[in-house]
Image (spheres, rainbow, N blue to C red):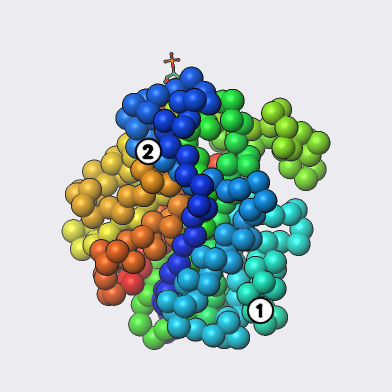
Amino acid sequence: MMYSRIAGTGRYLPEKVLTNFDLEKIVDTTDEWIRTRTGVERRHCVREDETTSDMCVEAAKRAIQKADVDVADIDLIIIGTTSPDLIFPNVATIVQHRLGIPACPAFSIEAACTGFIYALTTADKFIKAGEAKCALVVGAECITKLVDWTDRNTCVLFGDGAGAVILKSSEQPGIIGTHLGADGQYKELLYYPVGASKELHKAGTDEAGIVMAGSEVFKVAVKTLGNVASQALESAGIDQSELDWLVPHQANIRIIQATAKRLGLPMEKVILTVQDHGNTSAASVPLALDVGIRDGRIQPGQLVLMEAFGGGFTWGSVLMRL
Ligand code: UT7
């Protein structure tokens, strides 16, 4: 049996940092409200001329170096993002060219905040099917370019960044289980009202910003993420006490605390980055994974559960040994 295993991770965060105090000067909000309702203290924001592929390239370089692989060995690129540079070509091909990766399948997956989990799951299937041996998988988002900076309900939540992993074929697991889901009936609760075939003329104007019914999204997120986590462990026949780390999507500390509680997991076993990164959508899980690995908390061989939830709704989990 062939498995896939993470051989290296990397992250990139834009230089510019926006604190809650900075936001107090932009909209009618307070540091206290943002911290207590969301857990966010600061977030990174791209420069006007910075793009998703710029961030992917930097995060990927660090993952490639950590995994000690040659770019010539990479035979699959998948990028989870809802904020690609262009409508086409897909951002993975731009990244491929900029990194000098030889011809191989390169595509992006759009599943909002679950984008990285969808991308990693897809790469795992390619490797298990014997169709790839060394994949570059990235979650990246320039989401602050989609935010309406006059809407205090949403603009305080989001940040930019990219997290990358190199996923290699391995005789040892590696990825143990993956579960993806989606339910399109919830579209109205969280969406961006502009796309290639709808309202494109509004893009980049104050007529288009992220639309979110926050407290309703919150309720479904808590319930779904709890179920996703239990399902991942149950189907792998693993007791929750065996779990070393939870690496959750970083939308709101209260959602993360509820998931940890449901798993009976102390918060010391949860990698938290929401305070420093905000909600970086598809980038949040690989960013948190890289933080936990590079600061030495997540050790080789440990059992890690990653999970995410986002617009659609979409959701998913990846259970793995590092
Ligand atoms: O990543 C994809 C999935 N996304 C999520 O999972 C996000 C889920 N939702 C949430 O994290 C939370 O619902 C929010 C953080 C977005 C909002 O927190 P909440 O506790 O659900 O607040 P709320 O939307 O019910 O608003 C409570 C109050 C309202 O005032 P009134 O109507 O009670 O007078 C809002 O107008 O807080 C007000 N409010 C603010 N006040 C100060 C909303 N945003 C702000 C703000 N500063 N930035």
Numbered tag placed on residue 100 in the rendering: 1
> Dot 2, how many residues are within 10 Å of its Cα: few (below 14), some (14-19), or many (20+)?
many
Q: Are marks 2 and 1 in contact (CB under 8 Å)?
A: no
- Say which amino acid is labelled 1: Gly
Question: In the picture, residue 104 is in which quadrant?
Answer: bottom right
Residue that appears at 42% across and 84% down: 170
Q: Quadrant of the C terminus?
A: bottom left
Q: Is residue 312 above or below residue 12?
A: above
- Say which amino acid is labelled 2: Glu
Question: In the picture, residue 42 is in which quadrant?
Answer: top left
Q: Position of residue 194 (x, y in %)?
A: 72, 38
Q: Earlier in the sequence, mark 2 or mark 1?
A: 2
- Residue 65 visible to the viewer: yes
Q: Quadrant of the N terminus?
A: bottom left
Q: Secondary structure at mark 1?
A: loop
Residue 276 appears left or right of 212: left
Q: Position of residue 297 (x, y in %)?
A: 25, 64
Residue 322 appears left or right of 19: left
Q: Position of residue 294 (x, y in %)?
A: 34, 66
Q: Secondary structure at mark 2?
A: loop
Q: Position of residue 290 (x, y in %)?
A: 39, 63
Residue 151 appears left or right of 66: right
Residue that appears at 58% across and 41% down: 144
Ligand 1 closer than 8 Å to label 1 CB: no
Q: Nearer the viewer, residue 234 or 53?
A: 53
Distance of label 2 from label 1 (alpha carbons)? 37 Å
> Dot 1, how many residues are within 10 Å of its Cα: few (below 14), some (14-19), or many (20+)?
few
Q: Is residue 13 above or below residue 293?
A: above
Q: Quadrant of ligand 1?
A: top left
On the image, numbered disc 2 is attached to which residue? 41
- Residue 283 visible to the viewer: no
Numbered tag placed on residue 121 in the rendering: none
